[in-house]
Amino acid sequence: MSTLSDLQAKNPHIKIHSVTDPEFKSYGRLLPEAKWDAAQAHARKVWKVEDSIGADVSVPEFEADKDLDATISQRIYGQMPVEVGWVYGRNSMLNALEYHQGSEVHMPLEDVVFLVYKFEDIDWTPDPMIDTTKLKAFFCPKGTVTELAGWALHYVPVHVHEHLGFCDIFTLPKGSGTSLTSPKPDTPDGKLMVAKNQWVIAHPDFKDSGCVSGMKGPNVKINPLD
């Protein structure tokens, strides 16, 4: 059996697609031309598998990768300034969803699952609400570079292998995820803003996150392998 079929067998409660399936085209695309060897090598050297989730929105060593800059940053963002960061650890829950103005490119070092949701499916009246039964799950094999479009809500990747955890290098428009420097707008979407170019809607089970709760339905869990 394949990794995906094994994973699906452990998670009969949700259909898990592959990023190579046609369904993924509604959320993003594959970037097989991407080159990121230097960034990946640095991540492999310094990354340690831990239960807690760590993240940094800008890592100079990743941003110094000239091939990554040429094949991802310059191409995808049209010569606009970008940041290259990473998120790593272990995660098996949905917990929340976020969106940005601009797409996000993902470069996972291990197999992951992306839990995604369409922006158009958010119910904004009277307050932002997400129905988690409309959530989609996509298996992404390690080393497969994907671009999630700005309308594809997502959050922390889910690890597939318990003993490996996950490590995901990402690119975003420069400044995304950094501290706000002015008051948030008093609007439905303004209340969701947690950082520059970052809006988050949390599940009620995701307590003490400091994010606005706005989900109905289960807090989806993906049971990992080994």
Image (spheres, helix red, strand yellow):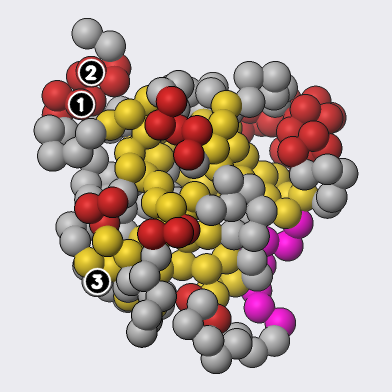
As drawn, 39 above or below 187? above
> Where does label 2 land, which residue?
5
Point out residue 211 in the picture as x, y percentages from the top left corner: 41, 75
Residue drawn 63% across the image and 26% down it = 31
Asked whether 126 or 88 is in front, the reply is 126
How far separated are the C-alphas under marks 2 and 3? 31 Å
Vertical placement of residue 30 versus 181, above or below: above
Which labelled disc corresponds to residue 103?
A: none
> Could you tell me which residue is drawn at 53 percent across and 53 percent down?
151
Instruction: Please tell me which residue lies in front, 175 or 213.
Output: 213
Q: Check disc 3 and give the amino acid type.
A: Pro
Residue tagged 1:
8
Q: Secondary structure at mark 1?
A: helix
Which secondary structure lies at badge 2?
helix
Upstream in sequence: badge 1 or badge 3? 1
- Evaluate if marks 2 and 1 touch, with contact meaning CB atoms under 8 Å apart: yes
> Is-magenta flag for residue 192?
no
- Which disc, if any, is residue 204? 3
Image-quadrant location for residue 68? top right
Q: Which residues are magenta?
A: 174-181
Residue type at tag 1 = Gln
Task: Measuring from the top left, give residue 77's x and y in whole percent.
Answer: 77, 44
Viewer-nearest residue: 217 or 84: 217
Q: Is residue 27 left or right of residue 37?
A: left
In the image: residue 146, left or right of residue 110: right
> Quick one: quadrant of the N terminus?
top left
180 magenta-colored: yes
